[in-house]
Image: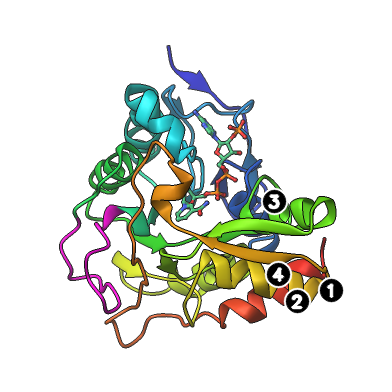
Amino acid sequence: MEHVIADPFGTRRVVVTGAGGQLGAALLESFPEARGLTRAEWDVTMPASFDADLVLHAAAWTDVDGAEANPQDAAAVNVGGTQHVAELGAPLVYYSSDYVFDGTKREPYLESDAPSPQSAYGRTKLLGEAAAGEDAWIVRSSWLFGWTSTNFVRTMLRLGAERDEVSVVADQRGCPTYVGHLADATRVLVDLPRGIWHLAADGECTWAEFAEAIFEEAGIDCSVRRITTADLGRPAPRPAYSVLRSERPDAPSLPHWREGLRACLERL
Ligand SMILES: NC(=O)c1ccc[n+]([C@@H]2O[C@H](COP(=O)([O-])OP(=O)(O)OC[C@H]3O[C@@H](n4cnc5c(N)ncnc54)[C@H](OP(=O)(O)O)[C@@H]3O)[C@@H](O)[C@H]2O)c1
């Protein structure tokens, strides 16, 4: 059954899918002319039909561990849903992930590096890139955090207020990226050629270092005990190293993750 959305636009027809998510919220601020569609307004696992000048596709199955147990459900959203968005025929920005890489490299992943996802989530995000098509902007980003939804920053603020010590993984390295900075970079990106773009915060750190920075910036007295990924024993494998950088000279650059952290904390 096709889901028909009646007149969802203002004057410039920009649509944000997954508007209830943390990136969706930020995109709606960076594109004030956009109409946001939450899952209740468009469940992307169903086809839809409407005209748009630009679709910013932020809807996704983002439960990385849940995807291991339910890979078909994750694929229905991340692959099938993306296909439905592409079928609208509008210019499309698809948000992909550092988890398309296996994390065995020890220097930043570039757009030309071969993906090799290790998790069900990573596989669905990579297949989603293909479903978005060659004529889309494929934005790979990493370790997103913002002022809404569940994310690492909000979880650490909660745990830090409850405990004297938290155990955090110290053997995964990446680029924590503030959704506000990614949304602003998307605004620049849509005037650039389509294709794959790596857009992640400047700098890099481990989750443990990120947790320490959160407590420091927020003035919370909580220590971080360093543990390994194996200690945590999560169902989905994560890349040990997933720093993303762009090899494209005109790629929009994002501020350092610590600047993103400060901007986010101001809103929490
Ligand atoms: N989070 C990260 O660390 C990270 C890193 C790299 C890339 N990304 C990518 O960045 C994008 C945005 O992620 P995010 O962090 O903003 O995720 P998020 O906060 O989990 O938001 C995703 C949104 O998609 C919605 N959604 C789920 N299934 C849907 C469906 N079938 N139809 C319509 N909407 C649906 C969710 O609604 P419900 O809340 O109702 O489920 C949620 O509002 C995703 O493509 C993600 O894969 C994320």
Residue at disc 1, CB closer than 8 Å to ligand 1? no
Whole-percent x and y of residue 246? Answer: 32, 78
| Residue 219 marker | 1
Q: Report which quarter residue 110 is drawn in.
A: bottom left
Give the amino acid at mark 1.
Answer: Gly
Do callouts 1 and 2 mark residues in contact (Cβ within 8 Å)?
Answer: yes
Viewer-proximal residue among 104 and 96: 104
Identify whether 143 is placed above or below 112.
above
SS at badge 3: helix
Do callouts 1 and 4 mark residues in contact (Cβ within 8 Å)?
Answer: no
Picture residue at 45% right of the left edge, 30% below the top: 66
The residue that mark 3 highlights is 155
In the picture as drawn, the residue positioned furthest to the bottom comes out as 249
| Residue 214 marker | 4
Picture residue at 40% right of the left edge, 38% below the top: 85
The residue that mark 2 highlights is 216
Among numbered discs 1 and 3, the one appearing first in the sequence: 3
